[in-house]
């Protein structure tokens, strides 16, 4: 299936919104919590989008903490999440201390300065991300417009099952 540049999807729940914008091999991810927001960009060279969806599925399945490299050319950020208790999720976006992740022999996964933090409802974060991904699957179940990697179907279905079970979201109509 050919990809057409420019897929955009937004999901929200409560005080949290997630926006994904794919265009020409880049993916912009916007986190918003209340009036605070962060926009980060990753390149197609690594599939940071699938790593992000995997990490959200891990959170939905009960993992306490996750980390994703959201790499640019050069530079990028770590997106760290950690559940503090019950339904509270902390998100920290930190610079890559060494921005040359494209030269793996010289690169170490060290965090630099913190760029953005938020403390949000875990359920709101999961539902906002799930809803954004549902909007993308409406566009195409196998490809994302403007992105060179396949849609992360396995990670999405893990997230979907966990969200529907733990947050009591009605099952999606897949017919």
Image (spheres, rainbow, N blue to C red):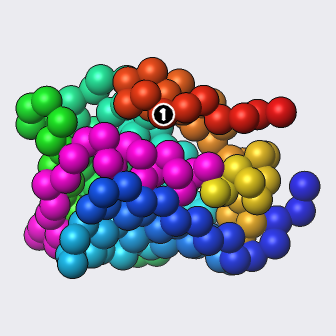
- Measured along the vertical axis of the image, is residue 145 above or below residue 37? above
Q: Residue at coordinates 76% horizontally, 59% vertically from top-left?
A: 139
Q: Position of residue 110 (x, y in %)?
A: 18, 54
Residue 165, image x and y in percent?
Answer: 45, 21
> In the image shown, does 142 or 95 lie closer to the viewer?
142
Residue at (19, 52) in percent of width and height = 120
Image: 10 above or below 56: below
Residue at 29% from the left image edge and 74% from the top image edge: 38
Q: Say whether residue 127 is left or right of residue 110.
A: right
- The answer to whether residue 154 is magenta is no
Residue ID at (76%, 34%): 174
**SS category of the residue bearing label 1:** loop
Question: The magenta stretch spans which residues?
Answer: 108-134
Q: Is residue 120 magenta?
A: yes
Report the quarter where the C terminus lies: top right
Is residue 102 visible to us here? no
Estimate the x, y position of residue 145 in percent, counting from the top left.
Answer: 74, 66
Q: Quadrant of residue 43?
A: bottom right
Q: Which residue is mark 1?
A: 169
């Amino acid at each position: 299936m050919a990809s057409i540049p420019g897929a955009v999807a937004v999901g929200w729940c409560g005080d949290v919104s997630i926006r994904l914008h794919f265009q020409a091999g880049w993916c912009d991810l916007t986190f918003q919590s209340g009036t605070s927001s962060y926009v980060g960009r990753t390149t197609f060279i690594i599939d940071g989008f699938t790593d992000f969806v995997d990490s959200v599925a891990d959170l939905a399945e009960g993992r306490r903490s996750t980390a994703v490299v959201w790499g640019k050319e050069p530079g990028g950020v770590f997106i760290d999440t950690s559940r503090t208790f019950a339904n509270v999720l902390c998100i920290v976006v930190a610079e890559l201390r060494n921005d040359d992740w494209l030269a793996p022999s010289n690169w170490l996964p060290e965090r630099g300065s913190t760029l953005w933090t938020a403390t949000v409802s875990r359920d709101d974060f999961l539902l906002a991300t799930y809803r954004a991904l549902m909007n993308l699957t409406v566009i195409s179940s196998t490809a994302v417009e403007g992105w060179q990697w396949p849609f992360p179907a396995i990670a999405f279905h893990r997230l979907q099952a966990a969200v529907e079970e733990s947050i009591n979201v009605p099952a999606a109509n897949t017919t």
